[in-house]
Image: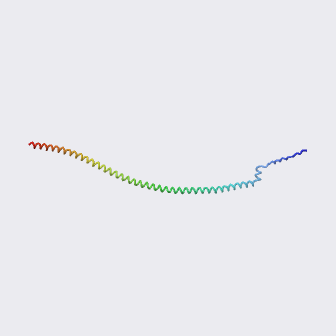
């Protein structure tokens, strides 16, 4: 006889169990796992929310500081702008006053110039008249000298 070894093959059990039956059998475990997952989710959200709140508070503090710094800068710039506007108004007032003075001086000088031109015209006319009169007088003197000379000659002759 041969020594033959007999190997027994395991027989697979056919599992005719359906998905619903598995669910019915393990519903407590499934519910426990789902509750555990939801609680972990809530815990994670809470931890993350706390970090997010801290981060947002830090950003708020930074932005608040930036706003306060900008407010200070705006106040300084507003003060400088007011000072500049005051200076401009003062210079405008001075310029307007100077302009009025210059216009008055210009009007006065223009009137003086007209008067002087009129005086020059009068003096020029008077000078021309005196020159004519002088010329006439010279002519008369010449005529008189000639007459005197003629008279002397006539008297000498006689």
Which residue reaches farthest front?
A: 156
Colouring style? rainbow
The quadrant in which residue 94 appears is bottom left
Which residue reaches farthest left?
A: 158
In the rendered view of the protein, which quadrant contains the C terminus?
Answer: top left
**Where is residue 45 shown, x and y percent of the image?**
66, 55
Query: With respect to residue 135, does 101 lie above or below?
Result: below
Task: Report the label total.
Answer: 0
**Where is residue 137 shown, x and y percent of the image?**
19, 45
The quadrant in which residue 90 appears is bottom left
Q: Along the line of sight, which residue is nearer the eye, 143 or 74?
A: 143
**Where is residue 131 shown, x and y percent of the image?**
22, 45
- Left or right of 4? Residue 80 is left
- Left or right of 128? Residue 74 is right
**Where is residue 101 shown, x and y percent of the image?**
36, 53
In the rendered view of the protein, which quadrant contains the N terminus?
Answer: top right
């Amino acid at each position: 006889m041969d020594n033959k070894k007999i190997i027994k093959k395991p027989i697979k059990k056919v599992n005719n169990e359906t998905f619903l039956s598995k669910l019915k059998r393990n519903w407590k475990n499934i519910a426990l796992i789902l509750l555990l997952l939801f609680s972990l989710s809530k815990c994670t959200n809470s931890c993350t929310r706390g970090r997010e709140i801290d981060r947002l508070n830090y950003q708020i503090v930074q932005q608040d500081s930036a706003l306060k710094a900008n407010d200070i800068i705006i106040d300084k710039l507003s003060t400088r702008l007011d000072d500049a506007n005051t200076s401009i108004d003062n210079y405008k007032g001075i310029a307007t006053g100077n302009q009025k003075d210059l216009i008055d001086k210009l009007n006065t000088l223009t009137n003086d110039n007209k008067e002087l031109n009129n005086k020059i015209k009068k003096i020029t006319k008077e000078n021309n008249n005196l020159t004519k009169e002088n010329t006439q007088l010279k002519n008369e003197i010449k005529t008189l000298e000639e007459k005197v000379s003629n008279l002397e000659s006539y008297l000498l002759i006689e």
